[in-house]
Amino acid sequence: MKSILAILSVVTSIVVLWYAACIPMNIQGVLTEAERAGAAVMPATAKERRGLNEFGLAARNSFVIPATWAQDRPRLPAPHQVAAELWETTVGKKITSKRSLVYHGWVTLSATLLGFAIGTGLGILLAVGIVHSRVMDMSVMPWAIVSQTIPIIALAPMIIVVLYSVGVQGIIPKAVISAYLSFFPVVVGMVKGLRSPDAMQLDLLQTYNATRSQGFWKLRLPASMPYLFASLKIGIAASLVGAIVGELPTGAVAGLGARLLAGSYYGQTVQIWSALFAAAILAACLVGLLGLIERGVLKRMGIV
């Protein structure tokens, strides 16, 4: 009960601050629209005008503050506007509609899952090689770290152009970008996990004359599971970001990235924010699903 109250308190505080932030962000547009409509929003004398800022003007006109929460194209949409847009584009639209966020979310999700699978597989293989080979540890690991210093927003167009030039289009370029972002957390976490057994456990295996493969399957791999799942949660979120970024330079017509682009082109800030929240909700669901899988796997292994 206390945890629920704490969560509600945090959410309520965020919503209140959000509504408060909408006033200074949107008030200029409201005053401009009111003046164009012929409403008297300025004080009567020049002296009064000099003594009042935009907030003072708003205080003299009771319609102004509520109007900052109801603009068609606000700088900062109010929470209820974003919630209404989310409801309209998920529940209020058919899944097959091009205006449905469920449709766009599925397009992005498909690239996310493919890229996540590729990145996870590559990360695990690299981690195993790094742990068992000093040459790979000294050569591959530094390059894996350096690869993450390249801004993805600059690398994504290069990947797409190269793949398009060899005839690879569709979901694959986005999956490659997702894999690029997701493999590094898996590599780092898996290396840490595979190296987590202490010296006494490794000496015990040598006492039993266990082979390297037996040590891997019986000790190193089970010990790495908590580290692996922690890395997978980071990787799946990074993979989703990669899929969205991969949609931006292609001029895609479907996907959450395409939805963000369309909202940016036409100044539809409510659409942009609803797509951002849809991406956040999708990421939370994916991380939550991995958490359930982690709990089941570790419980079956007797770790928790």
Image (cartoon, rainbow, N blue to C red):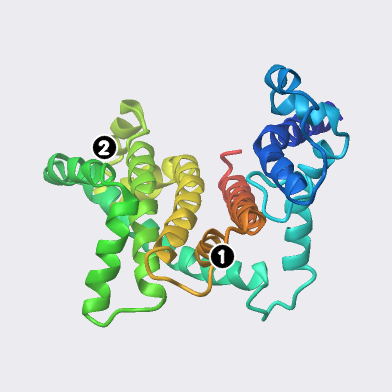
Taking the image as drawn, is residue 63 in sight? yes
- In the foreground, 273 or 164: 273
- Tell me: 62 left or right of 23: right
- Residue 98: quadrant of the picture: bottom right
- Residue 228: quadrant of the picture: top left
Q: Residue 246, how many percent across, how many down?
A: 40, 63
* Residue type, mark 2 in image: Gln
- Tell me: 213 left or right of 1: left
Q: Residue 240, how many percent across, how many down?
A: 49, 57
For the C terminus, the quadrant is top right
Taking the image as drawn, is residue 3 in sight? no
Instruction: State which mark lies toward you, 2 or 1.
Output: 1
- In the foreground, 7 or 265: 265
* Residue type, mark 1 in image: Arg
Q: Residue 229, how many percent across, how many down?
A: 50, 46
Kindly identify which numbered label has been placed on residue 17: none
- Tell me: 200 left or right of 48: left
* 2 or 1: tag closer to the N-terminus: 2
Residue at the disc numbered 2: 206
Residue at horizontal 78%, vertical 51%? 37
Residue at horizontal 84%, vertical 26%? 2
Residue at the disc numbered 1: 259
- Residue 188: quadrant of the picture: top left
The answer to whether mark 2 and mark 1 are in CB contact below 8 A is no
Which secondary structure, mark 2? helix
- In the foreground, 54 or 253: 54
Q: Establish if 21 lies above or below 175.
A: above
Q: Establish if 87 lies above or below 33.
A: below
Which secondary structure, mark 1? helix
Separation of residues labelled 2 and 1 (CA atoms): 57 Å
Q: Residues within 10 Å of mark 1 (few under 14, many from 20)?
A: many
Q: Residue 236, how many percent across, how many down?
A: 49, 53
